[in-house]
Image: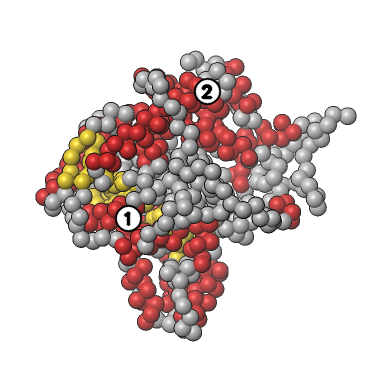
Amino acid sequence: MFSFQSIKNYQTFLAENSDGCSVAVNHYLSEIEKNKHLNSFLEVFAAEALQSAKELDAKRKAGKPLGKLHGVLIALKDVICYKDHQVSASSKILTNFTSIYNATAVEKLLAEDAIIIGRNNCDEFAMGSSNENSAFGIVKNAIDETRVPGGSSGGSAVAVQAGLSMISLGSDTGGSVRQPADFCGVVGLKPTYGRVSRYGLIAYASSFDQIGIFANTVDDAALVLEIIAGADDFDSTASEQKVPFYSSELKEEKKSYRIAYFKQALEHPGLDKEIASSIQTYIQTLKDAGYIVETVDFDLLNYIVPTYYILTTAEASSNLSRFDGVKYGYRADLNKEDDLTELYKKSRSEGFGKEVQRRILLGTFVLSSGYYDAYFTKAQQVRRMLCDQTKKIFEEYDAIISPTVPTTAFKIGEKSDDPIEMFLADIYTVYANLVGIPGISIPLFKHSNGMPFGLQVMTKHFDELSLLSLSKQMMQLKP
Amino acid sequence: MQVTDTTIDNLAHLARLRFNEDEKGSIKKDLQNMIAFVEQLKEIDTTGVEPLLHMSDTENVLRDDVIKGSISREDALKNAPLKDEEFFKVPTVIKK
Protein backbone atom coordinates (compact mmCIF):
# COMPACT_ATOMS: atom_id res chain seq x y z
CA MET A 1 0.00 0.00 0.00
CA PHE A 2 1.48 3.33 -1.09
CA SER A 3 1.50 6.17 1.37
CA PHE A 4 2.94 9.64 1.02
CA GLN A 5 4.71 11.53 3.81
CA SER A 6 7.03 13.92 2.04
CA ILE A 7 8.80 14.40 -1.26
CA LYS A 8 12.10 13.32 0.27
CA ASN A 9 10.55 10.15 1.58
CA TYR A 10 8.91 9.49 -1.80
CA GLN A 11 12.26 9.87 -3.53
CA THR A 12 13.69 7.13 -1.33
CA PHE A 13 10.71 4.96 -2.25
CA LEU A 14 11.37 5.61 -5.96
CA ALA A 15 15.00 4.64 -5.62
CA GLU A 16 13.89 1.27 -4.32
CA ASN A 17 10.95 0.67 -6.67
CA SER A 18 11.50 0.58 -10.40
CA ASP A 19 7.78 1.13 -11.10
CA GLY A 20 7.37 3.63 -8.25
CA CYS A 21 5.91 6.52 -10.25
CA SER A 22 3.28 4.26 -11.77
CA VAL A 23 2.43 2.87 -8.34
CA ALA A 24 2.02 6.42 -7.02
CA VAL A 25 -0.14 7.59 -9.92
CA ASN A 26 -2.39 4.54 -9.64
CA HIS A 27 -2.73 5.13 -5.92
CA TYR A 28 -3.76 8.75 -6.39
CA LEU A 29 -6.15 7.98 -9.24
CA SER A 30 -7.99 5.53 -7.04
CA GLU A 31 -8.05 8.00 -4.11
CA ILE A 32 -9.44 10.70 -6.40
CA GLU A 33 -12.11 8.30 -7.61
CA LYS A 34 -13.04 7.34 -4.04
CA ASN A 35 -13.36 10.99 -3.04
CA LYS A 36 -15.17 12.28 -6.09
CA HIS A 37 -18.01 13.61 -3.93
CA LEU A 38 -15.65 16.19 -2.41
CA ASN A 39 -15.62 17.83 -5.87
CA SER A 40 -11.98 18.82 -5.51
CA PHE A 41 -11.09 18.03 -9.14
CA LEU A 42 -12.76 19.45 -12.22
CA GLU A 43 -10.70 17.20 -14.46
CA VAL A 44 -8.19 14.42 -13.90
CA PHE A 45 -5.50 13.85 -16.50
CA ALA A 46 -5.43 10.13 -15.80
CA ALA A 47 -4.15 8.63 -19.05
CA GLU A 48 -1.46 11.26 -19.41
CA ALA A 49 -0.32 10.95 -15.81
CA LEU A 50 0.02 7.21 -16.21
CA GLN A 51 1.98 7.71 -19.42
CA SER A 52 4.32 10.24 -17.75
CA ALA A 53 4.79 7.88 -14.82
CA LYS A 54 5.81 5.10 -17.17
CA GLU A 55 8.30 7.35 -18.93
CA LEU A 56 9.73 8.58 -15.64
CA ASP A 57 10.10 5.04 -14.34
CA ALA A 58 11.98 4.16 -17.53
CA LYS A 59 14.16 7.23 -17.19
CA ARG A 60 15.17 6.17 -13.69
CA LYS A 61 15.86 2.66 -14.80
CA ALA A 62 18.09 3.97 -17.59
CA GLY A 63 20.11 5.86 -15.00
CA LYS A 64 19.45 9.25 -16.55
CA PRO A 65 19.72 12.39 -14.42
CA LEU A 66 16.47 13.03 -12.55
CA GLY A 67 14.58 16.28 -12.01
CA LYS A 68 14.19 17.67 -8.51
CA LEU A 69 10.49 16.85 -8.59
CA HIS A 70 10.90 13.51 -10.29
CA GLY A 71 7.51 11.79 -10.26
CA VAL A 72 5.93 14.27 -7.84
CA LEU A 73 2.20 14.59 -8.45
CA ILE A 74 0.95 18.15 -8.62
CA ALA A 75 -2.59 19.44 -9.10
CA LEU A 76 -3.30 22.88 -10.55
CA LYS A 77 -5.96 25.33 -9.50
CA ASP A 78 -8.26 25.97 -12.43
CA VAL A 79 -6.71 29.39 -13.07
CA ILE A 80 -3.26 28.14 -14.09
CA CYS A 81 -2.63 27.42 -17.76
CA TYR A 82 -1.37 24.03 -18.87
CA LYS A 83 -0.84 23.83 -22.62
CA ASP A 84 -3.42 21.84 -24.58
CA HIS A 85 -5.54 21.35 -21.46
CA GLN A 86 -8.73 23.04 -20.47
CA VAL A 87 -8.75 25.85 -17.94
CA SER A 88 -11.93 27.63 -16.93
CA ALA A 89 -11.40 29.70 -13.77
CA SER A 90 -14.45 27.71 -12.61
CA SER A 91 -16.55 30.00 -14.78
CA LYS A 92 -19.13 29.39 -17.43
CA ILE A 93 -17.55 32.20 -19.43
CA LEU A 94 -14.47 30.05 -20.12
CA THR A 95 -16.37 26.90 -21.02
CA ASN A 96 -14.27 24.73 -23.34
CA PHE A 97 -11.27 27.04 -23.27
CA THR A 98 -8.01 25.25 -24.01
CA SER A 99 -4.69 26.77 -22.94
CA ILE A 100 -2.39 27.47 -25.85
CA TYR A 101 0.69 27.82 -23.66
CA ASN A 102 2.05 26.76 -20.28
CA ALA A 103 2.16 29.04 -17.30
CA THR A 104 5.82 29.66 -16.43
CA ALA A 105 5.32 27.86 -13.10
CA VAL A 106 3.97 24.80 -14.93
CA GLU A 107 6.81 24.91 -17.44
CA LYS A 108 9.28 24.85 -14.54
CA LEU A 109 7.52 21.98 -12.77
CA LEU A 110 7.50 19.87 -15.92
CA ALA A 111 11.17 20.60 -16.52
CA GLU A 112 11.85 18.99 -13.12
CA ASP A 113 9.90 15.83 -13.97
CA ALA A 114 6.69 16.61 -12.08
CA ILE A 115 3.44 14.93 -13.10
CA ILE A 116 0.39 17.18 -13.47
CA ILE A 117 -2.49 15.09 -12.18
CA GLY A 118 -5.44 17.37 -12.85
CA ARG A 119 -7.10 20.71 -12.27
CA ASN A 120 -8.89 21.77 -9.12
CA ASN A 121 -12.19 23.47 -8.52
CA CYS A 122 -12.09 27.00 -7.09
CA ASP A 123 -14.24 30.08 -6.62
CA GLU A 124 -15.02 31.64 -9.98
CA PHE A 125 -12.07 33.79 -11.08
CA ALA A 126 -10.58 33.20 -7.63
CA MET A 127 -13.20 35.45 -6.06
CA GLY A 128 -14.46 34.03 -2.81
CA SER A 129 -13.54 32.61 0.56
CA SER A 130 -15.54 29.40 0.61
CA ASN A 131 -15.47 27.76 -2.81
CA GLU A 132 -19.24 28.25 -2.99
CA ASN A 133 -18.92 30.55 -6.03
CA SER A 134 -17.84 27.95 -8.55
CA ALA A 135 -19.86 27.34 -11.71
CA PHE A 136 -19.04 23.67 -11.12
CA GLY A 137 -20.44 23.26 -7.65
CA ILE A 138 -19.20 23.57 -4.10
CA VAL A 139 -16.20 21.72 -2.70
CA LYS A 140 -16.50 19.89 0.61
CA ASN A 141 -14.02 19.94 3.47
CA ALA A 142 -12.78 16.36 3.87
CA ILE A 143 -12.60 16.62 7.67
CA ASP A 144 -16.26 17.62 7.97
CA GLU A 145 -18.22 17.44 4.75
CA THR A 146 -20.88 19.84 5.99
CA ARG A 147 -18.23 22.56 6.07
CA VAL A 148 -16.55 24.62 3.37
CA PRO A 149 -12.88 24.07 2.52
CA GLY A 150 -12.29 27.82 2.30
CA GLY A 151 -11.44 29.64 -0.87
CA SER A 152 -10.79 30.59 -3.37
CA SER A 153 -8.35 27.70 -3.85
CA GLY A 154 -10.69 25.29 -2.04
CA GLY A 155 -10.30 22.36 -4.43
CA SER A 156 -6.51 22.65 -4.28
CA ALA A 157 -6.49 22.65 -0.48
CA VAL A 158 -8.73 19.58 -0.35
CA ALA A 159 -6.52 17.81 -2.92
CA VAL A 160 -3.64 17.88 -0.43
CA GLN A 161 -5.81 17.53 2.68
CA ALA A 162 -7.57 14.39 1.45
CA GLY A 163 -4.46 12.81 -0.06
CA LEU A 164 -5.55 13.29 -3.67
CA SER A 165 -2.29 14.91 -4.72
CA MET A 166 1.15 15.35 -3.17
CA ILE A 167 1.25 19.06 -3.89
CA SER A 168 -1.10 21.56 -5.43
CA LEU A 169 -0.66 25.06 -6.77
CA GLY A 170 -3.22 27.72 -5.98
CA SER A 171 -3.33 31.46 -6.35
CA ASP A 172 -3.49 33.98 -3.53
CA THR A 173 -4.85 37.48 -4.08
CA GLY A 174 -6.13 38.14 -0.56
CA GLY A 175 -5.61 34.85 1.24
CA SER A 176 -6.88 32.32 -1.28
CA VAL A 177 -4.08 29.89 -0.45
CA ARG A 178 -3.53 30.57 3.25
CA GLN A 179 -7.20 30.67 4.24
CA PRO A 180 -8.20 27.28 2.73
CA ALA A 181 -4.92 25.82 4.07
CA ASP A 182 -6.04 26.97 7.53
CA PHE A 183 -9.53 25.48 7.08
CA CYS A 184 -8.15 22.18 5.80
CA GLY A 185 -5.18 21.71 8.11
CA VAL A 186 -2.37 21.84 5.54
CA VAL A 187 0.56 24.15 4.78
CA GLY A 188 -0.32 27.06 2.47
CA LEU A 189 2.38 29.41 1.22
CA LYS A 190 1.96 32.73 -0.55
CA PRO A 191 5.34 33.97 -1.74
CA THR A 192 6.39 37.62 -2.00
CA TYR A 193 4.67 39.55 -4.77
CA GLY A 194 6.89 39.03 -7.82
CA ARG A 195 8.67 35.94 -6.48
CA VAL A 196 6.81 33.61 -8.86
CA SER A 197 5.95 34.62 -12.41
CA ARG A 198 2.27 35.29 -13.04
CA TYR A 199 2.55 34.39 -16.72
CA GLY A 200 -0.23 31.92 -17.45
CA LEU A 201 -2.12 32.69 -14.26
CA ILE A 202 -5.60 33.98 -15.10
CA ALA A 203 -5.59 37.49 -13.64
CA TYR A 204 -7.86 38.66 -10.86
CA ALA A 205 -6.02 41.67 -9.40
CA SER A 206 -2.60 41.99 -10.96
CA SER A 207 -0.85 43.95 -8.21
CA PHE A 208 -1.98 41.36 -5.62
CA ASP A 209 -2.01 37.99 -7.41
CA GLN A 210 0.64 35.44 -6.62
CA ILE A 211 0.84 31.71 -7.28
CA GLY A 212 1.01 29.79 -4.01
CA ILE A 213 1.71 26.26 -2.82
CA PHE A 214 -0.24 23.70 -0.79
CA ALA A 215 1.80 20.95 0.84
CA ASN A 216 1.83 18.56 3.76
CA THR A 217 5.11 19.88 5.09
CA VAL A 218 7.11 23.09 5.11
CA ASP A 219 10.00 21.24 3.42
CA ASP A 220 7.86 20.21 0.47
CA ALA A 221 6.60 23.77 0.03
CA ALA A 222 10.21 25.02 0.16
CA LEU A 223 11.33 22.63 -2.57
CA VAL A 224 8.45 23.52 -4.88
CA LEU A 225 9.00 27.25 -4.32
CA GLU A 226 12.66 26.90 -5.22
CA ILE A 227 11.58 25.41 -8.57
CA ILE A 228 8.79 27.78 -9.56
CA ALA A 229 10.31 31.08 -8.33
CA GLY A 230 12.44 33.41 -10.40
CA ALA A 231 12.65 36.00 -13.15
CA ASP A 232 10.68 35.55 -16.34
CA ASP A 233 10.86 37.21 -19.74
CA PHE A 234 7.09 36.96 -19.93
CA ASP A 235 6.36 38.79 -16.66
CA SER A 236 8.33 41.95 -15.99
CA THR A 237 6.94 42.12 -12.44
CA ALA A 238 8.64 38.81 -11.62
CA SER A 239 11.69 39.78 -9.62
CA GLU A 240 15.26 39.41 -10.87
CA GLN A 241 16.40 38.67 -7.31
CA LYS A 242 18.32 35.46 -7.00
CA VAL A 243 16.29 32.46 -5.82
CA PRO A 244 17.87 30.78 -2.78
CA PHE A 245 17.94 27.00 -2.49
CA TYR A 246 15.14 27.11 0.04
CA SER A 247 14.99 23.35 0.55
CA SER A 248 18.64 22.92 1.47
CA GLU A 249 19.18 26.29 3.13
CA LEU A 250 16.24 25.92 5.53
CA LYS A 251 17.55 26.42 9.03
CA GLU A 252 16.25 24.00 11.53
CA GLU A 253 18.35 25.22 14.37
CA LYS A 254 16.87 28.11 16.19
CA LYS A 255 18.03 31.60 15.45
CA SER A 256 16.91 34.19 17.95
CA TYR A 257 14.08 35.41 15.77
CA ARG A 258 12.29 38.55 16.85
CA ILE A 259 8.58 38.09 16.32
CA ALA A 260 5.82 40.70 16.44
CA TYR A 261 2.09 40.31 16.68
CA PHE A 262 -0.61 42.94 16.34
CA LYS A 263 -2.44 43.72 19.53
CA GLN A 264 -5.56 44.67 17.53
CA ALA A 265 -5.50 41.36 15.67
CA LEU A 266 -5.62 39.19 18.78
CA GLU A 267 -8.17 41.43 20.47
CA HIS A 268 -10.44 41.65 17.44
CA PRO A 269 -14.11 41.10 18.39
CA GLY A 270 -14.62 38.86 15.33
CA LEU A 271 -11.90 36.45 16.43
CA ASP A 272 -13.05 33.11 17.83
CA LYS A 273 -12.21 33.02 21.56
CA GLU A 274 -10.66 29.59 21.43
CA ILE A 275 -8.43 30.55 18.48
CA ALA A 276 -7.35 33.65 20.39
CA SER A 277 -6.48 31.72 23.53
CA SER A 278 -4.67 28.94 21.64
CA ILE A 279 -2.50 31.52 19.96
CA GLN A 280 -1.85 33.32 23.27
CA THR A 281 -0.74 30.05 24.80
CA TYR A 282 1.43 29.31 21.79
CA ILE A 283 3.06 32.74 22.07
CA GLN A 284 4.09 31.73 25.57
CA THR A 285 5.48 28.47 24.19
CA LEU A 286 7.56 30.46 21.71
CA LYS A 287 8.84 32.74 24.47
CA ASP A 288 9.72 29.75 26.63
CA ALA A 289 11.63 28.32 23.69
CA GLY A 290 13.73 31.46 23.56
CA TYR A 291 12.08 33.52 20.84
CA ILE A 292 11.41 37.18 21.42
CA VAL A 293 7.70 37.76 20.89
CA GLU A 294 6.31 41.24 21.37
CA THR A 295 3.10 43.06 20.70
CA VAL A 296 3.01 46.03 18.34
CA ASP A 297 0.26 48.51 17.63
CA PHE A 298 -1.47 48.34 14.29
CA ASP A 299 -4.32 50.79 14.23
CA LEU A 300 -5.07 50.37 10.52
CA LEU A 301 -6.30 46.79 10.95
CA ASN A 302 -9.97 47.59 10.37
CA TYR A 303 -9.16 49.45 7.17
CA ILE A 304 -7.24 46.77 5.35
CA VAL A 305 -10.26 44.83 4.09
CA PRO A 306 -11.99 47.93 2.66
CA THR A 307 -8.71 49.02 1.03
CA TYR A 308 -8.30 45.57 -0.39
CA TYR A 309 -11.80 45.49 -1.87
CA ILE A 310 -11.48 48.87 -3.55
CA LEU A 311 -8.18 48.05 -5.20
CA THR A 312 -8.86 44.44 -6.16
CA THR A 313 -12.31 45.07 -7.60
CA ALA A 314 -10.92 48.00 -9.60
CA GLU A 315 -8.18 45.81 -11.03
CA ALA A 316 -10.63 42.97 -11.61
CA SER A 317 -13.08 45.16 -13.51
CA SER A 318 -10.25 46.06 -15.83
CA ASN A 319 -8.72 42.56 -16.09
CA LEU A 320 -12.04 40.86 -16.74
CA SER A 321 -12.96 43.21 -19.57
CA ARG A 322 -11.12 40.78 -21.86
CA PHE A 323 -13.99 38.30 -21.53
CA ASP A 324 -16.16 39.66 -24.28
CA GLY A 325 -17.50 36.64 -26.13
CA VAL A 326 -15.32 37.39 -29.15
CA LYS A 327 -11.79 36.04 -28.77
CA TYR A 328 -12.54 33.04 -26.59
CA GLY A 329 -15.00 31.62 -24.15
CA TYR A 330 -18.75 31.77 -23.86
CA ARG A 331 -20.73 33.68 -26.44
CA ALA A 332 -24.45 34.28 -25.99
CA ASP A 333 -27.01 33.47 -28.66
CA LEU A 334 -27.88 36.69 -30.42
CA ASN A 335 -30.98 37.99 -32.10
CA LYS A 336 -30.65 39.28 -35.62
CA GLU A 337 -30.84 42.92 -34.57
CA ASP A 338 -28.26 42.64 -31.76
CA ASP A 339 -25.14 44.73 -32.21
CA LEU A 340 -21.62 44.34 -30.81
CA THR A 341 -22.44 46.04 -27.50
CA GLU A 342 -25.33 43.67 -27.11
CA LEU A 343 -23.01 40.74 -27.81
CA TYR A 344 -20.73 41.91 -24.97
CA LYS A 345 -23.55 42.52 -22.52
CA LYS A 346 -25.39 39.28 -23.14
CA SER A 347 -22.25 37.13 -23.15
CA ARG A 348 -20.87 38.69 -19.97
CA SER A 349 -24.15 38.69 -18.05
CA GLU A 350 -24.83 35.07 -18.93
CA GLY A 351 -21.22 33.94 -18.57
CA PHE A 352 -20.14 35.50 -15.26
CA GLY A 353 -21.54 34.36 -11.92
CA LYS A 354 -23.12 36.62 -9.33
CA GLU A 355 -20.09 37.33 -7.14
CA VAL A 356 -17.90 38.13 -10.15
CA GLN A 357 -20.52 40.55 -11.46
CA ARG A 358 -20.82 42.19 -8.04
CA ARG A 359 -17.08 42.76 -7.90
CA ILE A 360 -16.85 44.03 -11.47
CA LEU A 361 -19.61 46.49 -10.64
CA LEU A 362 -17.94 47.74 -7.46
CA GLY A 363 -14.65 48.04 -9.35
CA THR A 364 -16.33 49.99 -12.12
CA PHE A 365 -17.87 52.26 -9.51
CA VAL A 366 -14.60 53.09 -7.69
CA LEU A 367 -12.91 53.83 -11.03
CA SER A 368 -15.76 55.87 -12.47
CA SER A 369 -15.53 59.57 -13.09
CA GLY A 370 -16.46 61.56 -9.99
CA TYR A 371 -15.62 58.74 -7.55
CA TYR A 372 -12.11 57.79 -8.65
CA ASP A 373 -10.23 60.06 -6.22
CA ALA A 374 -12.54 59.52 -3.28
CA TYR A 375 -12.27 55.73 -3.47
CA PHE A 376 -9.50 54.46 -5.72
CA THR A 377 -6.82 57.09 -5.06
CA LYS A 378 -7.71 57.08 -1.38
CA ALA A 379 -7.16 53.33 -1.20
CA GLN A 380 -3.82 53.67 -2.99
CA GLN A 381 -2.81 56.21 -0.35
CA VAL A 382 -3.80 53.86 2.46
CA ARG A 383 -1.83 51.13 0.70
CA ARG A 384 1.23 53.38 0.85
CA MET A 385 0.66 54.01 4.57
CA LEU A 386 0.39 50.27 5.17
CA CYS A 387 3.64 49.63 3.29
CA ASP A 388 5.44 52.34 5.26
CA GLN A 389 4.21 50.98 8.60
CA THR A 390 5.20 47.48 7.57
CA LYS A 391 8.70 48.57 6.64
CA LYS A 392 9.09 50.07 10.12
CA ILE A 393 7.94 46.88 11.81
CA PHE A 394 10.48 44.84 9.87
CA GLU A 395 13.26 47.18 10.93
CA GLU A 396 12.75 45.78 14.41
CA TYR A 397 11.32 42.33 13.84
CA ASP A 398 12.03 39.30 11.65
CA ALA A 399 8.46 38.08 11.47
CA ILE A 400 4.85 38.95 12.21
CA ILE A 401 2.44 36.26 13.40
CA SER A 402 -1.36 36.29 13.53
CA PRO A 403 -4.31 33.97 13.24
CA THR A 404 -4.81 33.03 9.57
CA VAL A 405 -8.61 33.29 9.74
CA PRO A 406 -10.86 34.56 12.58
CA THR A 407 -12.91 31.33 12.70
CA THR A 408 -12.54 27.69 11.73
CA ALA A 409 -14.18 26.41 8.54
CA PHE A 410 -17.82 27.48 8.55
CA LYS A 411 -20.83 25.49 7.40
CA ILE A 412 -21.75 25.29 3.74
CA GLY A 413 -24.36 27.95 3.01
CA GLU A 414 -23.79 29.79 6.29
CA LYS A 415 -22.34 32.98 4.84
CA SER A 416 -22.81 32.76 1.12
CA ASP A 417 -25.54 35.41 0.93
CA ASP A 418 -23.70 38.17 2.68
CA PRO A 419 -20.70 39.54 0.77
CA ILE A 420 -19.53 41.73 3.68
CA GLU A 421 -19.53 38.93 6.23
CA MET A 422 -17.59 36.84 3.73
CA PHE A 423 -15.11 39.70 3.21
CA LEU A 424 -14.29 39.78 6.92
CA ALA A 425 -13.04 36.20 6.79
CA ASP A 426 -10.06 37.71 4.96
CA ILE A 427 -9.11 40.24 7.64
CA TYR A 428 -5.78 38.65 8.57
CA THR A 429 -4.68 37.47 5.15
CA VAL A 430 -5.26 40.46 2.83
CA TYR A 431 -2.60 42.45 4.65
CA ALA A 432 0.27 40.43 3.09
CA ASN A 433 -1.13 40.98 -0.41
CA LEU A 434 -1.66 44.69 0.18
CA VAL A 435 1.97 45.18 1.13
CA GLY A 436 3.40 42.39 -1.05
CA ILE A 437 5.13 40.39 1.69
CA PRO A 438 5.25 36.58 1.86
CA GLY A 439 2.91 34.72 4.19
CA ILE A 440 2.27 31.16 5.19
CA SER A 441 -0.38 29.31 7.15
CA ILE A 442 0.99 26.39 9.15
CA PRO A 443 -1.36 23.77 10.63
CA LEU A 444 -0.58 24.00 14.34
CA PHE A 445 -3.89 23.80 16.14
CA LYS A 446 -7.07 21.84 16.58
CA HIS A 447 -10.33 23.42 17.75
CA SER A 448 -12.72 21.73 20.18
CA ASN A 449 -15.24 21.65 17.30
CA GLY A 450 -12.93 19.15 15.61
CA MET A 451 -11.61 21.46 12.93
CA PRO A 452 -7.96 22.38 12.41
CA PHE A 453 -6.69 25.93 12.25
CA GLY A 454 -3.39 27.51 11.48
CA LEU A 455 -1.01 30.23 12.46
CA GLN A 456 -0.05 32.81 9.89
CA VAL A 457 3.60 33.85 9.69
CA MET A 458 4.83 36.74 7.56
CA THR A 459 8.30 38.11 6.89
CA LYS A 460 9.72 40.99 4.89
CA HIS A 461 9.83 41.03 1.08
CA PHE A 462 11.82 38.18 -0.47
CA ASP A 463 12.70 36.68 2.89
CA GLU A 464 11.01 33.35 2.27
CA LEU A 465 14.08 31.66 3.69
CA SER A 466 13.43 33.06 7.18
CA LEU A 467 9.70 32.47 6.70
CA LEU A 468 10.19 28.80 5.91
CA SER A 469 12.92 28.27 8.51
CA LEU A 470 10.85 29.81 11.27
CA SER A 471 7.76 27.89 10.14
CA LYS A 472 9.64 24.65 10.31
CA GLN A 473 10.88 25.46 13.79
CA MET A 474 7.38 26.41 14.85
CA MET A 475 5.99 23.11 13.59
CA GLN A 476 8.34 21.40 16.01
CA LEU A 477 6.63 23.29 18.83
CA LYS A 478 3.20 22.15 17.73
CA PRO A 479 0.90 21.96 20.76
CA MET B 1 -23.55 57.62 -1.24
CA GLN B 2 -27.02 56.52 -2.36
CA VAL B 3 -27.16 53.81 -5.01
CA THR B 4 -30.15 54.29 -7.33
CA ASP B 5 -31.49 52.40 -10.33
CA THR B 6 -29.77 54.98 -12.53
CA THR B 7 -26.43 54.29 -10.80
CA ILE B 8 -26.81 50.58 -11.50
CA ASP B 9 -27.82 51.20 -15.12
CA ASN B 10 -24.83 53.47 -15.74
CA LEU B 11 -22.34 51.15 -14.10
CA ALA B 12 -23.79 48.09 -15.81
CA HIS B 13 -23.40 49.80 -19.16
CA LEU B 14 -19.80 50.82 -18.42
CA ALA B 15 -19.01 47.24 -17.36
CA ARG B 16 -20.97 45.79 -20.30
CA LEU B 17 -23.24 43.88 -17.99
CA ARG B 18 -27.01 43.73 -17.79
CA PHE B 19 -29.30 43.04 -14.88
CA ASN B 20 -32.98 42.27 -15.20
CA GLU B 21 -35.45 43.91 -12.83
CA ASP B 22 -35.28 41.04 -10.32
CA GLU B 23 -31.51 41.06 -10.18
CA LYS B 24 -31.37 44.82 -10.00
CA GLY B 25 -32.96 44.93 -6.55
CA SER B 26 -30.41 42.59 -5.00
CA ILE B 27 -27.41 44.03 -6.80
CA LYS B 28 -28.48 47.51 -5.70
CA LYS B 29 -28.61 46.40 -2.09
CA ASP B 30 -25.28 44.56 -2.33
CA LEU B 31 -23.54 47.48 -3.98
CA GLN B 32 -24.99 49.87 -1.41
CA ASN B 33 -23.61 47.69 1.39
CA MET B 34 -20.25 47.24 -0.27
CA ILE B 35 -19.87 50.98 -0.83
CA ALA B 36 -20.86 51.74 2.76
CA PHE B 37 -18.26 49.20 3.85
CA VAL B 38 -15.40 50.67 1.84
CA GLU B 39 -16.39 54.21 2.84
CA GLN B 40 -14.81 53.51 6.22
CA LEU B 41 -11.58 54.67 4.59
CA LYS B 42 -12.84 58.23 4.83
CA GLU B 43 -11.96 58.11 8.54
CA ILE B 44 -8.25 57.98 7.72
CA ASP B 45 -6.31 61.18 7.19
CA THR B 46 -4.28 60.66 4.02
CA THR B 47 -3.29 64.28 3.49
CA GLY B 48 0.01 64.49 1.63
CA VAL B 49 0.35 60.71 1.17
CA GLU B 50 1.54 59.76 -2.30
CA PRO B 51 -0.70 57.04 -3.78
CA LEU B 52 1.09 53.71 -4.25
CA LEU B 53 0.92 52.80 -7.93
CA HIS B 54 3.38 49.93 -8.34
CA MET B 55 4.22 47.04 -6.08
CA SER B 56 7.72 46.25 -7.23
CA ASP B 57 10.83 48.36 -6.75
CA THR B 58 12.15 47.53 -10.18
CA GLU B 59 11.90 50.23 -12.79
CA ASN B 60 12.37 50.07 -16.53
CA VAL B 61 12.80 46.36 -17.02
CA LEU B 62 14.49 46.35 -20.41
CA ARG B 63 15.36 43.60 -22.84
CA ASP B 64 16.78 43.44 -26.34
CA ASP B 65 14.25 43.93 -29.07
CA VAL B 66 14.57 40.55 -30.71
CA ILE B 67 12.05 39.58 -33.34
CA LYS B 68 10.35 36.38 -32.33
CA GLY B 69 6.81 35.27 -32.82
CA SER B 70 4.37 34.79 -29.99
CA ILE B 71 1.48 32.62 -31.07
CA SER B 72 0.33 31.47 -34.48
CA ARG B 73 -2.89 32.71 -36.03
CA GLU B 74 -4.23 29.20 -35.81
CA ASP B 75 -3.63 29.12 -32.04
CA ALA B 76 -5.06 32.60 -31.59
CA LEU B 77 -8.27 31.57 -33.29
CA LYS B 78 -8.44 28.17 -31.64
CA ASN B 79 -10.76 29.20 -28.81
CA ALA B 80 -12.88 31.73 -30.67
CA PRO B 81 -16.60 30.97 -30.56
CA LEU B 82 -17.17 32.36 -34.06
CA LYS B 83 -14.45 32.77 -36.67
CA ASP B 84 -13.38 32.07 -40.20
CA GLU B 85 -9.91 31.10 -41.39
CA GLU B 86 -8.40 34.45 -40.54
CA PHE B 87 -10.70 36.53 -38.36
CA PHE B 88 -12.88 36.66 -35.29
CA LYS B 89 -16.45 37.24 -36.36
CA VAL B 90 -18.74 39.75 -34.66
CA PRO B 91 -22.05 41.39 -35.55
CA THR B 92 -21.82 44.10 -38.19
CA VAL B 93 -20.31 47.25 -36.67
CA ILE B 94 -20.63 49.54 -39.67
CA LYS B 95 -24.17 50.62 -40.22
CA LYS B 96 -25.34 50.33 -43.80
Which chain is mark 2 on?
A
Which residue is denoted by mark 2 in the rendering?
A372
> Which residue is at a point 52% across and 54% down the rendered structure image?
A232
Residue A244 in picture, x, y percent from top left:
37, 59
Quadrant position of the N terminus of chain A in the picture: bottom left
Q: Amino acid at mark 1?
A: Leu
Which chain is mark 1 on?
A
Q: Amino acid at mark 2?
A: Tyr
Rendering quarter of residue A338: top right
- Ranked by sequence position, the earlier of labels 1 and 2 is 2
Side (left or right) of B1 relative to A253: right
In this rendering, does residue A399 appear at all?
yes
Secondary structure under tag 1 reads: helix
- Judge the density around disc 2: few (<14), some (14-19), many (≥20) Cα neighbours within 10 Å: some
Residue B66 in picture, x, y percent from top left:
66, 55
In the rendered image, the residue lying farthest to the left is: A288
Determine whether B1 is above or below A201 in the image.
above
> Which residue is at a point 36% across and 46% down the rendered structure image?
A461
Secondary structure under tag 2 reads: helix
Q: Nearer the viewer, residue A334 or B60?
A: B60
| Cα separation between marks 1 and 2 | 39 Å
